[in-house]
Amino acid sequence: MSDSLPYIVLVGRPNVGKSTLFNRLIRSNRAITHDRPGVTRDRMEGLVRRKGLPAFGIVDTGGITLDAHAAVAEGPAGIRGFERDILAQAEAALAGAAAAAFVVDGRDGLLPLDEYLAAHVRRMGLPTLCVVNKVDGMEREDEQMAEFHRLGFPLLPVSAEHGYNISALCEDLAALLPKNAAAEPPAPPALRLAMLGRPNAGKSSLINALAGEERMIVSDVAGTTRDSVDVRFCRDGRDYVFVDTAGVRRRTRITDSVEKFSVNAAIKSSTKADVTLLTLDAVQGVSQQDKRLMDMLHTRKTPFMILINKCDLAPREALATLKKNVADTLAFCGHVPILTVSALTGAGLKKILPLARKIHEECQARIPTGQLNRAMEEVLARHQPPVVKRVRAKFFYLTQAETAPPTFVFFVSDAERVPESYSRYLERALRKLFGISHAPMRIHLRSSHKKRS
Ligand code: GDP
């Protein structure tokens, strides 16, 4: 194992799937078996490399000798005989480790040997993630997870065999590493932007003003239609692309400012982008089509911002009224930022690209499971869920299912008893705790009837 890389140890009783997990984590990287004298026999070491994450080592201590004992792994009686082996191996490996992944079997449930080993791992005082393996179907996931909360580690359900949640596992494990061990992240790809708005709102002017002189127009000349014209440029060392600007530039009649634009075509462009910019005309105000577009962007959980352009032409009060009007239209998605800008004078333009980057970063946020569950405790304590039909819903567990947009799943005793207002409170609280202020977010509540402790 490279001395410079931190490593994480897989710990767990035999047959929970440590070696399958180990192989999943190292992928094509070669595993090396070390034959060391003394207690550390059969120690497998490998490298975990994932895009966007610091590389780290992984050590599997569950060796061949232990598998031979697997048949007696059931029940407390089975502990005796090889507990010393497991512990000695695990402790030797844990001594130099940055963190531990405590692996359990979601199908077997929590066995006495798990609790026994967990107590030892806990005593080592390392950041530890409890990996619940063999969780193969979403429908039973919450049930399978329930009893492992007792161990007191943050939990992550995975299936080593089916590859379920393996990238989340890599991210959660990387999050356990000491911060200074994190390697330089690779250069980020160009941020893709879509510019929407009705004709004459000032879309081309804004693109020109933002992209400046050094922009590169990349048009799809090979095809007969010149539908996809991208404008690439670099600002403050970061790359950006305005996608699909053909629609933006295809201006028919300058005077025809009420000309309808196709909402569907606009939505299509926004799906090609990381962040969408919807430009309104400060003089014309919000049209029906603008409203429809905002509504659709919201429903589709598109990351977007509103630009009120031509603010140089509108008197201050008119601008304030318009801004309020737009905010009212957006009442259903208060996270969407509204900027007043002018492509002509340059007012407000400096804020656009950094804000677009921030929205995109927020969309990619991945909160480690441990942090999420501590946050959940805190949020519930501050405001407990209301009593509905004489019962208060119990919250068991919180996990992040997706990024882009960040999607959080609460496992609760009875989702029916959590009113809409309370899930809105949960969303606001999570936004605040994790600094997700402008990205869209999804909150799901899933009923989990079988909570044992
Ligand atoms: P597009 O159809 O949305 O691409 O709109 P254009 O960028 O072609 O702009 C339409 C008209 O509005 C042009 O005459 C621009 O010069 C003008 N315009 C664009 N932005 C501004 C602005 O911020 N202030 C003023 N006063 N005029 C603007």
Image (spheres, rainbow, N blue to C red):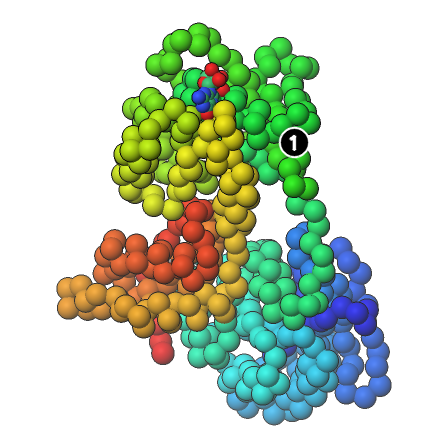
Instruction: Please tell me in which quadrant of the rendered image residue 208 appears.
Output: top right
Q: Which quadrant of the view contains residue 85?
A: bottom right
Foreground pick, 329 / 39:
329
User: Which of these two is toward me, 104 or 334?
Assistant: 334
Residue 253: where, in percent of width, then height?
44, 7
Does the rendering let one see residue 128? yes
- Name the quadrant containing residue 285: top left
Between 155 and 383, the one lying in front of the other is 383
Q: Residue at x 45, y 53 (%)?
A: 436
Residue at 52 percent across and 21 percent down: it is 204
At a point 46% along the width and 51% down the height, the residue shown is 406
Tell me if residue 290 comes above or below residue 80 in the rendering.
above
Q: Amino acid at mark 1?
A: Phe
Residue 433 rendering spot, x and y as whole percentages: 43, 62
The percent position of residue 161, horizontal first and vertical second, equals 60, 59
Residue annotated with mark 1: 233
Eyeballing the image, is 257 above or below 40?
Answer: above
How many marks on residues? Answer: 1
Extreme residue in the left direction: 389
The correct choice, above or below, for 59 with respect to 282 in the image is below
Residue 336 percent location from the top left of the image: 39, 42
Question: Is residue 242 visible to us here?
Answer: no
The quadrant of the picture occupied by the C terminus is bottom left
At 60% from the left edge and 38% from the top edge, which residue is drawn? 191
The 10 Å Cα crowd at callout 1, few under 14, some 14 to 19, many 20 or more, is: many
Q: Is residue 136 above or below residue 298?
A: below
